Structures are given as C-alpha cells and as structure tokens.
Image (tube, rainbow, N blue to C red):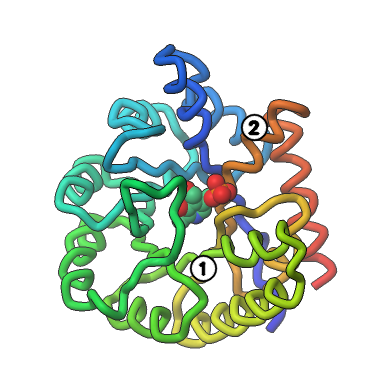
C-alpha cells in the first residue's frame, strides 16, 4: 500500500504539567506549550487526565478545550468518572488507555478482548456524542479484532516495547516487535480501522514507524518535552516533523 496523505503529529503535553506540578507552581503552562506546538506544525494535542491527576489536571482540560484550535485527543482510562468528563467536554477524540496507579507510564495496551462487552457499552455514548474513539493496544491480533468488534474507529498501536528494545540495544527483539507492529497496522487497516501509533518514540525510533503506510497519526510527548530543554519546543517538534516527513517520502 502507498502511504495516503500526510502523517499527522499529535504532541502530548502531559510532561509540561509534570514539571509544573513538581513545584506546585502555575508554570510552565501546558496551554502555552500547545499553542507553540501548533505554531511548530503539530496537527493535534494529546493530554492524558490520569485518575491521580499526577500531570494534567481537570483545569488543564478545561483550558485546553477553551484555547485550542487544534483537535484535542483526550487520553483516559475506561472509568465512569472519565466518561462523564469526556461527555462534558466532547473533545475531538478520546483514546482509551489502561491505567495502573503504581505505573510510571502507560505500560501496556488495553486488554480489549477480555472486557469486550463492558468496553462496547462504555464507548457507545462517547461515539454518540461525536468523539472519535481510539483504543490503545499492543500489536496483537486478538486485541485488534476485539477493538474492531466493539465499534472503535481508531486503534493506536503501542510502540513502547519497540522503543525499549531499541534503547536496550536488543535489536533482534526490536525488529521482531517492529514486524508485529507492521503486520497489525496492515491487518487493522484491512478491517477498516484508522491506525495511529505512539509511546516512547524518539528521533532514533520514529522513522520506521512513520514509514508504515497504514499509520495516519503519531502521538509523541515525553521525548519532545525532554528535547525542548536543549533545543526549545518549537525546534524539537520541527525536527520530529522533518524526520517523519522524510521517512514517509522515502516509503
Ligand atoms: N499515546 C498514548 C496512548 C499514550 O498513553 C502516550 C503517553 O501518555 C503517548 C502516546 C505518548 O508517549 P510518550 O510521551 O512516551 O511519547
């Protein structure tokens, strides 16, 4: 398959809030970061309101909804509380992610297959409210099929394992995981699902994922916010954008 259209970049601004919350100050402001991301060429803003509010807060979501012209991709766990918040704000997209209190970041994909019934009921009102529902899953055929059956329009493939193996220098495992990501991107597309990908992506790991023709959007945060310390947020986003576009063109 030929890549269709320009790959979208969603910039995740959670860790601007992490830095702010470390001191309980009013700065740095995630909304300011979102505006800068837009100027630098981001196509969307992603924010994860965690149950423990460790980074993004309810007020941040309100401020983002008010200030953003870019679409907001609202990441959340499949809880009643989060469903109510999403239904109140009606963001462009809702991405359902697994969440454990003790984890440092979203460690794995959602177990859709085991919770199919509950999740089908859970996402129905979100879809009725006009939100695009995306499900964050590992590159596993059972999960892709289940996401399709429950009526999700989008899956986001978890690239964390691929990035971790790369960082550890375990290139055999990295390549095996990449193979699974490629297969599942193609399989999901054949079912009519829109395919996104993200988690842990860096300048070093982004290009093979960006070159997958079925992938329409990447969501990237932690690396960009870290890189912003050295080069500024705008230049970091522009460099990521350049690498994505180059990979896409070569594909
Ligand atoms: N996509 C999803 C569903 C996520 O949960 C996250 C992390 O919040 C990301 C993308 C971005 O990951 P990272 O911050 O590691 O780039």
Q: Residue at x 25, y 46 (%)?
A: 86
Residue on which the image places disc 1: 157
Q: Earlier in the sequence, mark 1 or mark 2?
A: 2
Q: Residue 77, position in %: x, y?
A: 29, 54
Q: Residues within 10 Å of mark 2 (few under 14, many from 20)?
A: few
Report helix, strand or loop for mark 2: helix
Q: Are dots 1 and 2 in contact, CB under 8 Å?
A: no
Q: Nearer the viewer, residue 139 or 169?
A: 169
Q: Residue 13, position in %: x, y?
A: 51, 36
Q: Quadrant of the N terminus?
A: bottom right
Q: Residue at x 64, y 60 (%)?
A: 164
Report helix, strand or loop for mark 1: strand
Would you say residue 41 is visible in this rendering? yes
Would you say residue 10 is visible in this rendering? no
Seen as rendered, the residue at the extreme top is: 25
Q: Residues within 10 Å of mark 1 (few under 14, many from 20)?
A: many
């Amino acid at each position: 398959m030929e890549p269709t259209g320009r790959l979208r970049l969603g910039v995740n601004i959670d860790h601007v809030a992490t830095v702010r919350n470390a001191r309980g100050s009013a700065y740095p402001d995630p909304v300011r970061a979102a505006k800068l991301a837009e100027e630098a060429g981001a196509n969307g803003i992603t924010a994860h309101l965690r149950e423990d509010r460790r980074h993004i807060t309810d007020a941040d979501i309100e401020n983002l909804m008010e200030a953003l012209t870019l679409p907001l991709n609202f990441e959340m766990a499949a809880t009643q509380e989060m469903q109510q918040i999403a239904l109140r704000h009606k963001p462009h997209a809702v991405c359902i992610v697994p969440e454990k209190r003790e984890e440092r970041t979203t460690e794995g994909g959602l177990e859709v297959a085991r919770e199919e019934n509950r999740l089908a009921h859970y996402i129905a009102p979100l879809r009725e409210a006009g939100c695009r529902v995306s499900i964050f899953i590992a590159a596993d055929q059972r999960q892709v099929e289940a996401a399709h059956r429950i009526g999700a329009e989008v899956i986001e493939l978890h690239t964390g394992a691929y990035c971790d193996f790369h960082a550890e220098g375990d290139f055999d495992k990295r390549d095996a995981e990449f193979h699974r990501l490629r297969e599942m991107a193609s399989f999901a597309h054949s079912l009519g699902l829109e395919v996104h990908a993200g988690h842990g992506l860096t300048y070093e790991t982004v290009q093979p994922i960006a070159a997958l023709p079925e992938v329409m959007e990447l969501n990237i945060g932690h690396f960009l916010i870290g890189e912003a310390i050295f080069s500024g947020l705008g230049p970091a986003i522009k460099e990521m954008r350049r690498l994505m576009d180059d990979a896409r063109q070569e594909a």
